[in-house]
Image: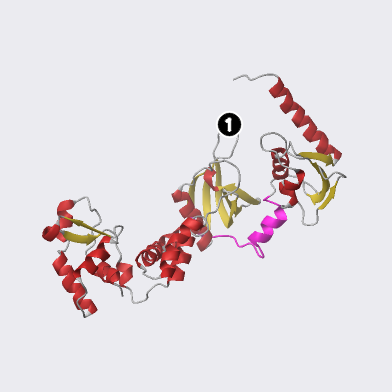
Amino acid sequence: MTIQNHLLAILPYVDDPEDKQRAAAIGLPFGDIYAQICARLNENPPQRSVRRAMSEMPDYVDHVGHTRGARWFKVRDTGMLRSEERMQTNTAIALRALRRVATYQLPDVVFAELEQKFAQAQATLDLGRDDRARQGKSWEAKFMKIEGTQPLVFPSIDPAIYRSITDALLRDRRLDIRYEPNKPVPEIAEYRKLSPLGLLDLTGLLYLIVHAPDKTRMLRVDRMRAATVREQAAQAIPGFNLEAYVRQSHLAEYMPEPEVELKLRIHPREGKYARTAAQHILTSIKLDANQQIRWDGGRRTFVLTARVRPSVSLRNFLHSQSDTIEVLAPASMRAEFAKRLRRMADRYASGCSD
């Protein structure tokens, strides 16, 4: 064990460092700390090494008073570091990554029970003296995930509701839910004896898939106003598979229609953010794994053909690229887009009114 580890085992814990009187009463003088360090190491390290070790741990060690009157203590409860089972550095790196990304991918009760492991992982990286610990500590600043590309702030989720629905999902228990759907006139729907089947994170919005007496429903968690767990076993759905259900229901597409052959002409973007057709997003990201591209003679534009299911999601994407994407077929979708764009043009032509 390093001097840092021994220090955290020796120093008393003070939960409120601002309470100077209590911190002074609990804290230890440097002489006592040094004596215990020597006893633990069975040697006498230089006092300056011990002082340097304490000064390098500002997130863990603090003191009140000065010089011989200083009383030292730790400001984090690091009892887990006294465990005989030391955490490996690679495990600590993985746990810190899990802490960042798994907020809505683990039951709340499981996440809460891991908090001590997360703290141990942070301490392992903070106090490690080898290169891997240093590299692991900086890893968080080297990796980032952006949920979607839309500049949107998603609604928050009530922690108590998340705790209830994940508890029911984990233990296969039924739920009563008070739900406020998105309607012009606010109203509360009461759903009782729901059997939770799974959670779906759909580009930043969290949905609970439930089996109700009438059908399988998908409820947005942020629209739930209350969730109560019943101590009644959930109804099992033989053969239910969340991944297969999402795929077969085309939930990611939102209100899908029968498959069609979509034909688009891709034009270059002009103006401030000018890009050629060859730089268009659809040359690297596909609408269909088997889509075909046919360039015109001058390679200024190209025609893309793909088998797709028209949906709200697809339309939103095509409209977001409307200055570069022209719908050629099917004719009904072309007419739909032309009508919508004419309506938009009329609004802009009529002048600004607030």
Q: Is residue 14 above or below residue 302?
A: below
> Extreme left residue here?
69
User: Any magenta on residue 240?
Assistant: yes
Q: Nearer the viewer, residue 327 or 129?
A: 129
User: Any magenta on residue 110?
Assistant: no
Q: Is residue 292 above or below residue 336?
A: below
Residue under the image location 82 percent in, 37 percent down: 334
- On the image, the x and y values in percent for residue 112 come to 41, 60
- On the image, the x and y values in percent for residue 192 come to 55, 49
Amino acid type of disc 1? Answer: Val
Would you say residue 100 is visible in this rendering?
A: no
Quarter holding residue 179: top right
Quarter holding residue 123: bottom left
Q: Nearer the viewer, residue 112 or 318?
A: 318
> Extreme right residue here?
297
Q: Nearer the viewer, residue 316 or 290?
A: 290
Q: In this rendering, would 96 be left or right of 148?
A: left
Read off the residue under disc 1: 185
Quarter holding residue 270: top right
| Quadrant housing the N terminus | bottom left
Residue under the image location 60 percent in, 42 percent down: 150
Q: Secondary structure at mark 1?
A: loop
| Quadrant housing the C terminus | top right
- On the image, the x and y values in percent for residue 29 come to 14, 64
Over which residues does the magenta segment extend?
229-252
Q: Is residue 113 above or below residue 306?
A: below
- On the image, the x and y values in percent for residue 340 come to 75, 31
